[in-house]
Amino acid sequence: MEKLMLGVIGDPIAHTLSPLIQNAIAEKLGIPAEYGVYHVPLADLPDFVDMAKKTLRGFNITIPHKQNILPYLAEIDDYAAGCGAVNTVRIKDGKLHGYNTDGDGLRMAMAMNDIRMENNRILMLGAGGAARSICRKALELGSSVTVLCRNPEKADDFRTFGASVGQMTTENISCHAETAGIIINATPLGMEGIREDFTDLSFLDRTKAAVVDIVYKPAETTLLKGCRERDLTCMNGLGMLVCQAVYAFAIFSEAEFDLEAMAGHVMDVVSKVIYGKTNHKEN
């Protein structure tokens, strides 16, 4: 069997867990693969694309290239085009085909934790790249989405999608939390290495929503600790990280396998490495 040549690009990239995840999937499936990590500053993106066309079957993309890669694509699927961002590229016959697996990744991770993205009322905090993908997927699945962010004027795309947008204030969070079925933190608040964190969790006292924090390190953020103290269903971002990667590997390899079972296996592998324990169901 021909070796599957894959990789991930970003700037910075040293922190990436993609090799651990993708190699775990390949090993479980018995598919020979080699997964490289490529530090690619924006100025070097054209040279990387030329190299990738000749040597790789596909690659994952992280910050800041999810939009930068768009001009190099021969084809982009409808969902990724709607998001305006690509995190997965498959190379076929020397041409780049773009996909975005973030939305499906979070949907599957939530389902594995008994949280349904479909037909729900979602309050999303933050309006970054991941939020765009999540918002589109939730709307596609029949949910309503309210996005609260620091700079609502920069969130016009969310209004175009069909979401409501407002200022991320304590008062607004509390107001919308009362009626939300799911609250998603798509900000970096509470992330390891980030000084800023939630300072007021009183909105959790006014909700029965399931809470999803897309931060995965630390395993329990200040937000999730507050949820557990109030017996709210909650999960961290490890599931999204792994599930979007499982979808990506299926695109790269064109192999057929049980995506959810694979995600459970890989979450165990990754949890042992970054948390020192096996725990693929976070709530």
Image (cartoon, helix red, strand yellow):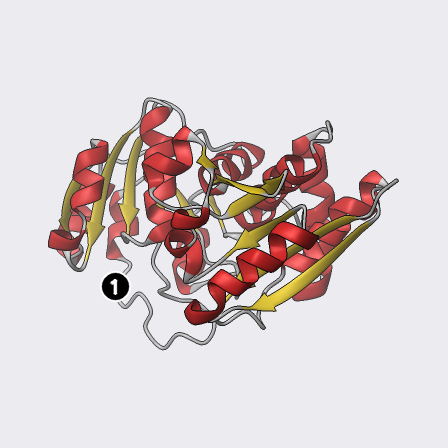
Q: Which of the 4 image quadrants contains residue 134?
A: top left
Identity of the residue drawn at 62% across and 59% down: 51
Label 1 neighbour load within 10 Å: few <14, some 14-19, many 20+:
few
In x, y percent, where is residue 84?
33, 43
- Front one among 189 and 24: 24
- Name the foreground residue: 142 vs 114: 142
| Position of residue 221 in the picture relative to residue 13 (left or right) | left
Q: Is residue 7 above or below residue 4?
A: below
From the image, tell me which residue sits under label 1. 200
Is there any visible trace of residue 230 in the rendered image?
Answer: no
Instruction: State the quadrant of the C terminus.
Output: top right
Is 243 situated above or below 129?
A: above
Asked whether residue 282 is in view, the answer is yes
Q: Residue at x 27, y 52 (%)?
A: 127
Dividing the image into 4 quarters, which one contains the N terminus?
top right
User: Would residue 29 appear left or right of 151 to someone viewing this image?
Assistant: right
From the viewer's perspective, tell me whether residue 223 is left or right of residue 3.
left
Picture quadrant where residue 189 is located: bottom left
Q: Position of residue 147 (x, y in %)?
A: 23, 44
- Name the kind of residue labelled 1 in the image: Asp
Residues 17 and 123: in front is 17
Q: Residue at x 31, y 29 (%)?
A: 139
Frontmost residue, 189 versus 137:
137
SS at circle 1: loop
In x, y percent, where is residue 30? 86, 41
Tell how many labels. 1
Residue 253, percent from left and from top? 71, 37
